[in-house]
């Protein structure tokens, strides 16, 4: 197992390139199961989760080649529509093969998913959506078993906003018989990147304001070629890193329109950010002002940026309150930040953060993907040396994160534990 060692207090500067979005490429890879034609995906990040999805596709009998940042996928024949526990337990996004397999094969057996330990993330809305499309769905020995000769269009409203639920049911419905109307769908840019791909394949999908989709089922879909959108969460992470630790950082590939809520909050904190064509430039702040934040579904403040924001608030000039409305166990990083000297009190879904003059290096342990990033950037800002254990979480969602930080001047290196 590997850990990261960080020597804090170094001011960063330079340029960093944002990778393709993890949360966009995984559902797009799953969509390739809807056709027997070749699918080409560009700007693919080299991440542990992407490699897991490649393994899952190969287990299903799919031909996959990966050259640099381009994936070529051809699901000429599905060997067996089974997604086994050993793979799915490590990555929640594996459940995204459920809808496409059922749509194409009329049968799917998918293990209940795993992923980060950030609270309950049941797939009951996925199951309700499939049942609404006339599929029979049972859970046996930890597996979801779904059957349908051909699903039938229906009107279905999600009880609450769910990203993977929206993606799964959209993919399930594109070849259903007749018209499907989905209401209260997720609005994340990654969802629309997937819908763009499905339209390239020949799916008939129309957005109905404000948050509904109308889908007319087709009998078959073609292949596609697509460039994955940049990772807005990685961009937000580097914005916060720049605010805390830099002289000036240019973040290339960051899309301002995907980061409105994050940018608004950073402006409130007194952070200076300017935009250029296809880039954002952030200046390091001598003083960070406190600002309360609540996580909400897009276009609200992302839960995936909450941990990084907490690290920044831990050295702000005053007190802030962070409210987590998406996941009930997403404050595990607070205890680790306290080991570095942060003053944080957690009360249910709220964290009261009283900024301290400085953080101090310490050995800490990552509990999930975004917590990993928060501990790394806190260590960069801290006085002294820190060791962050369990960085396999980090490698699930950030491509060459420590390498990119090194290019900005950070003193950071990997060790074997």
Image (tube, rainbow, N blue to C red):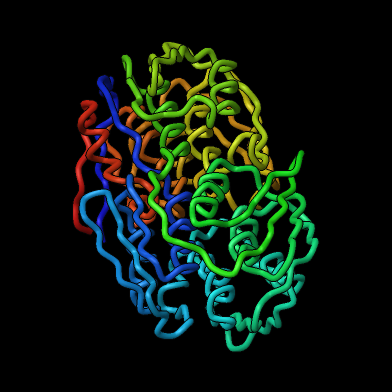
Q: Which quarter of the picture shows residue 386?
A: top left
85, 222: nearer the viewer: 222
User: Is 190 placed left or right of 8 in the picture?
Assistant: right
Q: Residue furthest bottom?
A: 141
Tell me the residue at 30%/57% (across/down). 71
* Side (left or right) of 125 relative to 375: right
The quadrant in which residue 38 appears is bottom left
Determine the residue positioned at 54% across, 33% down: 343
Q: Is residue 390 something one can see in this rendering?
A: no
**Foreground pick, 231 / 342:** 231
Percent of width and height locating residue 244: 41, 23
Q: Which corner quadrant holds the N terminus?
A: bottom left
Task: Say above or below: 47 vs 260.
Answer: below
Name the residue nearer the viewer: 77 or 17: 77
Is 170 above or below relative to 10? below
* Vertical placement of residue 370 versus 149, above or below: above
| Rendering coords of residue 14 (x, y %) | 25, 21
Q: What residue do we see at 39% from left, 79% from top?
A: 77
Where residue 90 sits in the image (x, y, percent)? 43, 68
The correct choice, above or below, for 156 with respect to 296 in the image is below
Q: Residue 337 versus residue 186: which sits nearer the camera?
A: 186
Q: Position of residue 203 (x, y in %)?
A: 58, 57
């Amino acid at each position: 197992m590997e850990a990261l060692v960080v020597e804090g207090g170094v001011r960063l500067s330079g340029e960093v390139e944002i990778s393709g979005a993890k949360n966009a490429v995984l559902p797009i890879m799953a969509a390739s199961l809807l056709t027997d034609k070749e699918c080409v995906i560009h700007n693919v990040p080299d991440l542990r989760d992407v490699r897991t999805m490649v393994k899952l596709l190969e287990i299903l009998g799919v031909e996959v080649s990966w050259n640099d940042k381009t994936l070529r996928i051809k699901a000429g024949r599905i060997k067996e529509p089974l997604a086994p526990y050993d793979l799915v337990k490590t990555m929640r996004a594996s459940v995204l093969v459920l809808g496409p397999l059922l749509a194409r094969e009329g049968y799917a057996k998918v293990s209940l998913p795993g992923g980060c330990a950030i609270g309950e993330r049941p797939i009951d809305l996925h199951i309700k959506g499939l049942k609404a499309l006339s599929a029979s769905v049972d859970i046996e020995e930890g597996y979801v078993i779904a059957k349908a000769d051909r699903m039938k269009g229906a009107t279905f409203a999600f009880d609450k906003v769910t990203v993977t639920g929206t993606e799964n049911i959209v993919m399930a419905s594109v070849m259903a018989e007749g018209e499907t109307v989905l209401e209260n769908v997720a609005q994340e840019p990654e969802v629309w990147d997937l819908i763009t791909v499905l339209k390239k394949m020949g799916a008939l999908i129309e957005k109905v304001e404000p948050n509904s989709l109308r889908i007319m089922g087709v009998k078959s879909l073609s292949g596609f070629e697509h460039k994955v959108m940049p990772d807005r969460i990685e961009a937000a992470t580097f914005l916060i890193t720049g605010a805390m630790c830099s002289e000036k950082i240019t973040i290339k590939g960051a899309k301002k329109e995907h980061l409105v809520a994050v940018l608004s909050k950073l402006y409130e904190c007194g952070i200076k950010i300017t935009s250029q064509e296809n880039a954002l430039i952030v200046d390091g702040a001598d003083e960070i002002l406190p600002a309360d934040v609540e996580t909400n579904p897009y276009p609200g403040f992302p839960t995936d940026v909450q941990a990084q924001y907490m690290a920044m608030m831990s050295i702000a000039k005053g007190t802030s309150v962070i409210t987590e409305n998406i996941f009930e166990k997403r404050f595990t990083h607070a205890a680790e930040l306290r080991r570095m000297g942060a003053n944080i009190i957690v009360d249910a879904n709220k964290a009261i953060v009283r900024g301290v003059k400085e953080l101090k290096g310490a050995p800490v342990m990552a509990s999930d993907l975004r917590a990993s990033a928060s501990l790394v950037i806190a260590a960069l800002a801290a006085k002294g040396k820190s060791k962050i254990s369990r960085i396999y979480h980090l490698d699930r969602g950030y491509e060459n994160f420590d390498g990119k930080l090194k290019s900005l001047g950070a003193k950071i290196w990997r060790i074997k534990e």
